[in-house]
Image (cartoon, grey):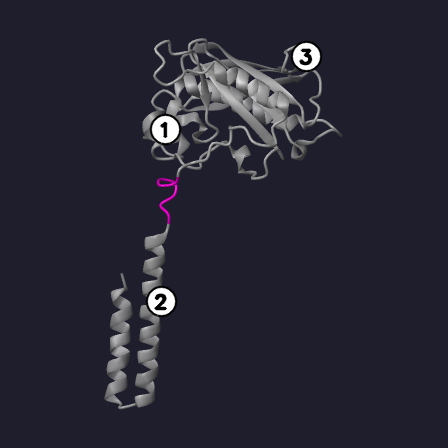
Amino acid sequence: MIPRSLLFGRGLALSHAFSNQNASTVHQQLSMTAWNLRSSLRNIRTLSLMSLWPFNVKPRDFSLPNASWRPEMSKAYEYYNALCEIEGDEKRRLWRKLPSYNRVLKYTTGGVYLSKIIQSKARLFTRNIKEPGAAFEYVVFMNKQEKRCVCVFQAGHLLEGPPGHVHGGAVATMIDSVMGTLAGYMSGPVMTANLNINYRSPIPLGSVVLLHSALDRVEGRKFFVTCRVTSTDESKLHTEATALFVSVNVGHLFGTRF
């Protein structure tokens, strides 16, 4: 909508110009008015064509196989994916593959409504890297009945810390993300209150590891979670961790209280 002040101001200017019978001024004012009208119409058209992100954009799931996955990554994916429930299957298997967007929000307790508000591109922050295999390649499989999950993780070259090995901060990022995913899946929105990590052996860059996370116990709003990072055959332990997550209400996520 064109501001009334714009039209009113131009009208006064034109009236003044006509009263002085200044043809040159009238022409200039008319040109400026026409320019402003075209500009306003362009702005309106631009707004009308703007995407209402994040509400009308279908999010992309980055936890699906791609060409950067090593055979070991694909094999582990296929193994756990075969355990997942199949829609319409009467037996309803225990495992479920989680998408890499939405922070698995719509699958958490009470999260289905909130996910409609902040869905779309609200993925784990590690998924903002477009180059496949450059950083965090991972997929999470959840077993809600057994209160545990497994993450298959492949570290790319951008995550190098010690020469030829994964940076400890990148390992901590994955541990926190996976443990938080489990706690959130079981309770709804949570935040990390405490995270303790013991590094046992470095992870070679480009290798594939498994993150085994389990819910240890619940005390009111507190969720105690454990995690083990191992080789895919589970013969080698790379990292161990424990964490405390606290459930929060929706208001905390938006910096307010409902």
Which residue is disc 1 drawn over? 250
Q: Residue furthest right?
A: 163
Report helix, strand or loop for mark 1: helix
Residue at the spot of label 3: 236
The numbered mark at residue 47 is none
Q: Quadrant of residue 57?
A: top left
How many residues crowd around disc 2 within 10 Å: few (fewer than 14), some, or many (20 or more)? few
Q: Can residue 248 be spotted in the picture?
A: yes
Cα separation between marks 3 and 1: 40 Å
* Residue at 60% across, 28% down: 69
Q: What stretch is highlighted in magenta?
A: 51-57
Q: Is the magenta stretch mostly helix, strand or loop?
A: loop
Mark 2 = which residue?
39
Q: Which residue is drawn at 32% across and 64% down?
A: 41
- Check residue 155 for magenta coloring: no
At a point 71% along the width and 21% down the height, the residue shown is 202
Give the Cα separation between the discs numbered 2 and 1.
41 Å
Q: How many labels does the image show?
A: 3
